[in-house]
Image (cartoon, grey):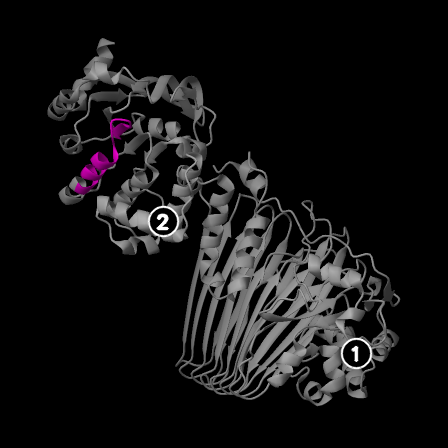
Amino acid sequence: MVNENLVKDVVKEPYKYGFVTDIETEKIEKGLNEDIIKLISQKKEEPKFLLDFRLKAFKKWQKMKEPDWAALGYKKIDYQDIIYYSAPKQKEKISSLDEVDPKLLETFDKLGIPLTEQKKLTNVAVDAVFDSVSIATTFREELAEHGVIFCSISEAVKNHADLIEKYLGTVVPASDNYFAALNSAVFSDGSFVYIPKGVTCPMDLSSYFRINSGDSGQFERTLIIAEESSSVSYLEGCTAPMFDTNTLHAAVVELIVLDDASIKYSTVQNWYAGDEEGVGGIFNFVTKRGKCLGKRSKISWSQVETGSAITWKYPSCLLLGEESVGEFYSVALTNNLQQADTGTKMIHIGPKTKSTIVSKGISAGNSKNSYRGLVKMGTKATGSRNYSQCDSMLIGDQASANTFPYIKSQQPNSEIEHEASTCRISEDQLFYLQSRGIEFEEAVSMMVSGFCRDVFNQLPMEFAAEADKLLALKLEGSVG
Amino acid sequence: MQSKMKESDPILEVENLSASTDNLPILKGVSLTVYPGEIHAIMGRNGCGKSTLSKIIAGHPSYNITNGDIKFLGENINSLEPEERSQSGIFLGFQYPIEIPGVSNLEFLRVSTNARRKFLNKEELDTFDFEELVKEKLEIVKMDHAFLSRSVNQGFSGGEKKRNEILQMALLEPKIAILDETDSGLDIDALRIVASGIKKISSAQTGIILITHYQRLLDEIKPNYVHVMSDGQIIKTGESDLALELEEKGYEWTDNFIKET
């Protein structure tokens, strides 16, 4: 009985980041074949091992089939109609930010990520990625004093080839899945983080991914290594212009955590979601996985997924080390014709491992929002525990929510707990808040943030405020 | 006494109000006028339209006004949003206060209070100043500070929910409060607390409508008028002794009034 029109109005989404930066770009021709891969590798002046890694992945990808098990419906992607490398034209070697095209700096300024020395954020180091390349990374010297390496993955390939060769593809092998194989073949840029033994990273690290070009895909690759007893908090943000075509984004993120180390990885994903009729928007197919290799290693994923036409994403933890801990906190908001199939995999391999899953899905408009998760207890995972809580909130009566929890246990001496709920913002709740002087829009947004509270509490402070604002913005519209 | 009250303008005027939900008529021509300082009781069987009347005055979107007017301080409010009515000083105490998971009671109370303060051109309160104010108001309903950190009404007992309603009334300082079966589900002690709270909050400038089934609330808060509702109409109006008579004779007695009319 909720006044449908009011709810429809309130979930109308204005997208603030839909502008295009008019900049000269260097693009290679459309299509995907061995020559294209060689060309990408050559442009990035890569060592042979990496070219081999790419070509092997490409061979595997050719033999694989695009997965169709997710609760997603979309037009078939033509992989030959995509540009696999697009970079803004700039000087060969950039030695300082002064040489970066002011248009690029302006773009990141507009996105709220100032990069210049005078304006840069003071409490967080940023790696800014524009289409296929990293533009700048702030606070590098300061971080280097602590032995922390934070740079683009392209640079890491040049300067820290040993680490790349040792770890790349060890968490998400090229053959892992269709999109991971594609990424392994054509990945362009992304971030690399190395935290040495015993170091607590002195500030949060952040990557900001910006898609600017309409016809090229973005294939970022991120690798984070936390050595023994180290810790880092890493944040990731993403936006894209409004195009009426779909852009493919297929990323791979790998985390390696050793004894007593921890990585907290937070994402606010706000790729362009398409318009109200479902035209345009990013196809977001992402493989994120971390390995808790050591004793008491810890990985915590938190994500706020609000954008993209299609989201296919399952940040996962392989809990190998004894007493290692995996966490997944997720808010996924879909509106209009957006579709999200997202969740996690917690693979308990070592003994006394622990995992927590808290997932909050909000579906509005005609959207489709599914939680899909796997909790697996291996034969050696004695004394291990999992707790999962998956809640869905429906706004209006056209949206749908699904929960697909998969549980596999080969270890009787382990505990798995799963709770799920579905709720609807009821007319009575809205009336109650309104009858206390609270405007309709604010009432909806209060209830949505209340619903997400458990997850927001896990986000780094500035991110939590941003996420709250972002959800409110997504649900903003003209009332009555 | 009464004539003196009526020298001032009425707070609320319900004029020949008819309303329906899903094309089903619920109210069939209700008239009611409340002057400052007055306490009105509305009694009647379940389903007679008492709660509907209170919800319509507060602006519930499920009901359509098919005829008549509601005036607040002389202005027609038929088309005002519920939040506008609240901000301007109409308060509805819910029979069944709604649970809002995840929304902290303190934050809810603060946002609500500030919405009213903004309307009154008073300074909005930050968290610290609001804490001070709410501490003082908690005294009125003898509620523990711990209630504030919980989610709105979630897991509250029946009595706690009702006290939370009166706390909201105390914070919002309405011109008129309509209290829908605020006494139901309360034990004797809680009833006393709630009743004395209502008395403390009300003044010679405010009006109160008590919707109740029971005399015991009216023993604590003596009404100036008692109205008996049946089938969407007010069928009898009297002074406080009408409630006593009703308690004694039951609603069957009132059925005769319908036959008479």
Image-based side of A162 in relation to B146, left or right:
right
x%, y% of residue A339? 63, 55
Marks 2,1: beta carbons within 8 A:
no
x%, y% of residue A276? 67, 45
Image-based side of B17 in relation to A299, left or right:
left
Task: Name the chain letter of the residue that bears numbered label 1.
Answer: A
x%, y% of residue B102? 41, 54
Task: Name the chain letter of the residue that bears numbered label 2.
Answer: B
- Please, which residue is most extreme toward the top here? B260
Query: Dot 1 corresponds to which residue?
Result: A59
Q: Nearer the viewer, residue A33 or A132?
A: A132
- Please, which residue is most extreme toward the front here? A118
Indicate the quadrant containing the C terminus of chain A: top left, top right, bottom left or bottom right.
top right
Residue drawn 43% across and 66% down? Answer: A418
Determine whether A145 is above or below A235 in the image: below
Q: Which residues are magenta?
A: B193-210
Q: Nearer the viewer, residue A473 or A356?
A: A473
Q: Secondary structure at mark 1?
A: helix
Q: CA distance from mark 2 to mark 1?
A: 65 Å
Image-based side of A67 in relation to B193, left or right:
right
Determine whether B45 is above or below B136 in the image: above
Determine whether B32 is above or below A429 in the image: above
